[in-house]
Image (cartoon, rainbow, N blue to C red):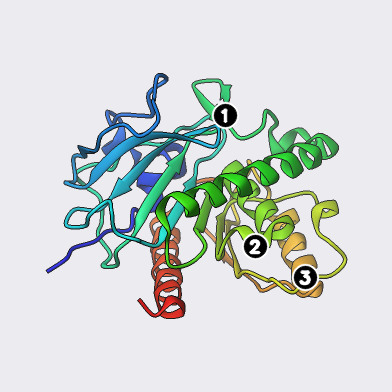
């Protein structure tokens, strides 16, 4: 019997995204000297992993225990937040039951004790700089997603999950390069409204948003206004708000995210007929 895993936000998006980050304090991170196509090793939870360097992004690739790296598995790409980094799964990883290949890229910029997708904070109010940075980052991230498809031949376009700044990149990619991904699952993020076109195009990947109402890093009010704008312009978008959550993934948010990932994987395999 094959076994599989979808990593939770607490594993994939980094300790600052979580309310149980202590379990990952000693987990290994992407090596500064990561080479292309390193051999697979075994992670603490029994899954296979390797460090990769593809299309100018370093990442950890994870194949759950019981699956072969040679299988044409659905791909879930998870983008960390600002000043964070990807980590290997710990022995405490929870295990929903669908086959998947998980990719944990690392932001290209060194930022404080971690990495960034671009060197600006949302709360700095540098909206024009963010717009330019997000346009360029979304373009290059779409090329990365295409390279992943060419390498692994998944049954559908990659499913992308992003927290905070990683969520901003996910949103910008879903809006400006919708052909690059199948679904965008976003937590605690916002993008400048100028990035939203007057009308959604023919390709409209589902965009699912969640936000804590106590978030003081990425304010929920602009995020709610962005949701209204996306909905009014024809995007396939949903927003879920959490009363007691700050700028972190609460247990309730993790539960919802897991269900989103499960649903996206089910739709991916159903469309492909595999």
Q: Which residue is mark 1?
A: 108
Q: Earlier in the sequence, mark 1 or mark 3?
A: 1
Secondary structure under badge 3? loop
Residue for point 72% across, 65% down? 227
Residue 27 or residue 36, whichever sits in front: 36
**Spatial separation of the CA atoms under disc 2 and disc 1:** 23 Å
**Spatial separation of the CA atoms under disc 3 and disc 2:** 10 Å
Q: Is residue 258 above or below residue 187?
A: below
* Residue 137 in view: yes
Q: Is residue 223 above or below residue 143?
A: below
Quadrant occupied by the C terminus: bottom left
Residue 141 or residue 244, whichever sits in front: 141
Q: Are marks 3 and 2 in contact (CB under 8 Å)?
A: no
Q: Residue furthest left?
A: 1
Q: Earlier in the sequence, mark 2 or mark 1?
A: 1
Residue for point 16% across, 57% down? 66
Spot occupied by residue 98 in the image (x, y as percentages of width and height): 29, 67
Quadrant of the image occupied by residue 212: bottom right
Q: Which residue is mark 2?
A: 179
Q: Which residue is mark 3?
A: 201
**Spatial separation of the CA atoms under disc 1 and disc 3:** 29 Å
Spot occupied by residue 201 in the image (x, y as percentages of width and height): 77, 70
Residue 265 or residue 140, whichever sits in front: 140
* Residue 245 in view: no
Spot occupied by residue 9 in the image (x, y as percentages of width and height): 41, 51
Residue for point 72% across, 42% down? 134
Q: Residues within 10 Å of mark 3 (few under 14, many from 20)?
A: few
Which of the numbered marks, if any, corresponds to residue 253?
Answer: none
């Amino acid at each position: 019997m094959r076994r599989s895993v979808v990593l939770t936000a607490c594993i994939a998006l980094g300790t600052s995204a979580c309310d149980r980050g202590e379990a990952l304090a000693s987990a290994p991170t992407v090596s500064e000297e990561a080479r292309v196509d390193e051999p697979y090793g075994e992670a603490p939870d029994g899954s296979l992993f390797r460090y990769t360097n593809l299309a100018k992004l370093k990442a950890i690739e994870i194949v759950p225990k019981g699956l072969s790296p040679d299988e044409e598995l659905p791909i879930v790409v998870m983008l960390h937040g600002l000043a964070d980094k990807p980590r290997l799964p710990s022995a405490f990883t929870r295990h929903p039951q669908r086959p998947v290949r998980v990719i944990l890229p690392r932001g290209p910029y060194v930022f404080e004790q971690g990495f960034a997708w671009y060197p600006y904070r949302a709360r700095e109010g540098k909206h024009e700089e963010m717009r330019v940075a997000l346009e360029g980052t979304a373009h290059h991230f779409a090329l990365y997603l295409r390279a992943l498809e060419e390498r692994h031949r998944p049954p559908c376009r990659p499913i992308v999950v992003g927290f905070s700044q990683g969520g901003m990149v996910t949103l910008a990619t879903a809006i400006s390069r919708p052909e690059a991904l199948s679904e965008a699952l976003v937590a605690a993020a916002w993008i400048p409204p100028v990035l939203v076109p007057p009308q959604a195009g023919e390709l409209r990947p589902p965009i699912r948003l969640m936000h804590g109402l106590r978030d003081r890093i990425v304010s929920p009010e602009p995020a709610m206004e962005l949701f209204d704008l996306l909905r009014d312009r024809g995007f396939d978008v949903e927003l879920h708000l959490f009363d007691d959550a700050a700028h972190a993934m609460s247990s309730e948010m993790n539960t919802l995210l897991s269900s989103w990932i499960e649903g996206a994987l089910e739709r991916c395999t159903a469309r492909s007929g595999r």
